[in-house]
Image (tube, grey):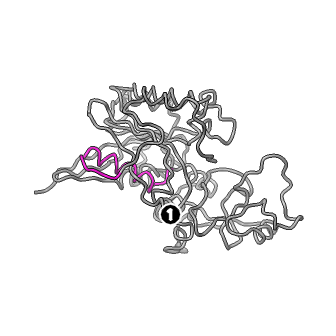
Amino acid sequence: MKKKEIKFKLAELFSGPGGLALGAIRSFAENKDTIYGIEPVWANDYDADTCKTYARNIHNGNGKSVVCGHVQEIDFKKVPKFDVLAFGFPCNDFSVVGEQKGFDGKFGPLYSHGVRAINTHNPKWFIAENVSGLQSANGGEAFKQILRDLSEAGKGYILTPHLYKFEEYGVPQQRHRIVIIGIRKDLGLKFKVPAPTTKYNYVSARMALESPRIPDNASNQELTKQSLGVIERLKHIPAGENAWYEGIPKHLRLNVKGARMSQIYKRLDPNKPAYTITGSGGGGTHVYHWSEHRALTNRERARLQSFPDNFVFEGSKESARKQIGMAVPPIGAQAVISAVLKTFAGVSYESIESKLDGEANAREAVSLFDGVKTMTTVVL
């Protein structure tokens, strides 16, 4: 007997290039009579190149399904009906690197448009993503308020927030993010955090970049032109070390006073996951190969973000770099979303207790965050 198919219709805000969506459409679960999956129907971002990338890779080139513009101007009553909402709301004001303005910044309040979308469509579930610094913004009050608002949105949702270390889920990169899963209360389901799959067997940078090697004709594979000075400096920096390595000759050292960012001219350690890939930053922030004296290409960065080689990033080299750095790693997203689908399918899976929420609803959970300090530093 042919199994019934249930496909949750996915809408996404602050979509980025489509890392979360790619993980979603690759996810599935099945029980004895039903297969559960995801179908993307609509997305929004404000960056033109990002929208083109999303349309090309997620909607098979159909730009009409991707609304490129400011989220404040969207009338959600005119958005196609959806069963699941994804939104990695902008993290600029929550990152622990910077002023961490939280709700007092330009980007902090933008999560409220996710609440607005939920109020309009009452999706069966949602997935929200942000940096770990969300925990401590505004003295911890921002996270509490976000949890309250999400739990009370629409018909009400049972939340499971968790700080995911994506290198523990097969991503060849140390990338730590808070992901909040909300399932509508009237459905009577409770999501459990999936257990790590590579906690003791990380995917290394070497494995990601060399197995297999990137084809010469791959997209987004342009090399960055390095100055002779940068090349000379890199020659004195061993794998895993950065611009502050003591073995660098004095005439090649950086003349920097005050804080010294650990990622400046930092070379990858080929035997470990990469450090966090960023979408912006000046000289020295482009991520550097462990043995070749150069910055990585965008395709190499994309591999460390777990994107497949056939995922094409539109726009200039700098635009592609920005898109790659802002994205949710698809393999990490797939690990979480597959567990959500298993929850709906009634299929058991290995799980762990949330590091952020041991209770069934957000009102009880927020009390856990009093005095919580940031658990990890993330650079955007």
Give the magenta-colored segment's residue range: 328-350
Compare residues 330 and 51 and report the one nearer the observer: 330
Residue 202 at x, y percent in the picture: 50, 63
Where is 131 relative to 368, above or below?
A: below
Compare residues 227 and 99 and report the one nearer the observer: 99
Residue 193 at x, y percent in the picture: 39, 46
Where is 112 relative to 34, above or below?
A: above
Q: Report the side of 9 relative to 301 (left or right).
A: left
How many numbered marks have been drawn onto this rendered protein structure? 1
The answer, for residue 67, to whether it is visible in the render is no
Q: Secondary structure at mark 1?
A: loop
Q: Amino acid at mark 1?
A: Tyr
Residue 7 in magenta stretch: no
Residue at 30% x, 53% y is: 28
Where is 264 relative to 100, above or below?
A: below
Residue pointed to by mark 1: 202
Compare residues 113 and 216 and report the one nearer the observer: 113
Circle 1: is it few (<14), some (14-19), or many (20+) Cα within 10 Å? many
Residue 75 at x, y percent in the picture: 42, 28
Residue 347 in magenta stretch: yes
Residue at 63% x, 46% y is: 377
Q: Report the side of 233 relative to 215 (left or right).
A: right
Q: Report the side of 288 relative to 148 (left or right).
A: right
Residue at 36% x, 56% y is: 26
In the rendered image, the residue lying farthest to the left is 1
Residue 183 at x, y percent in the picture: 34, 36
Main structural element of the magenta stretch: helix, strand or loop?
helix
Q: Report the side of 259 relative to 326 (left or right).
A: right
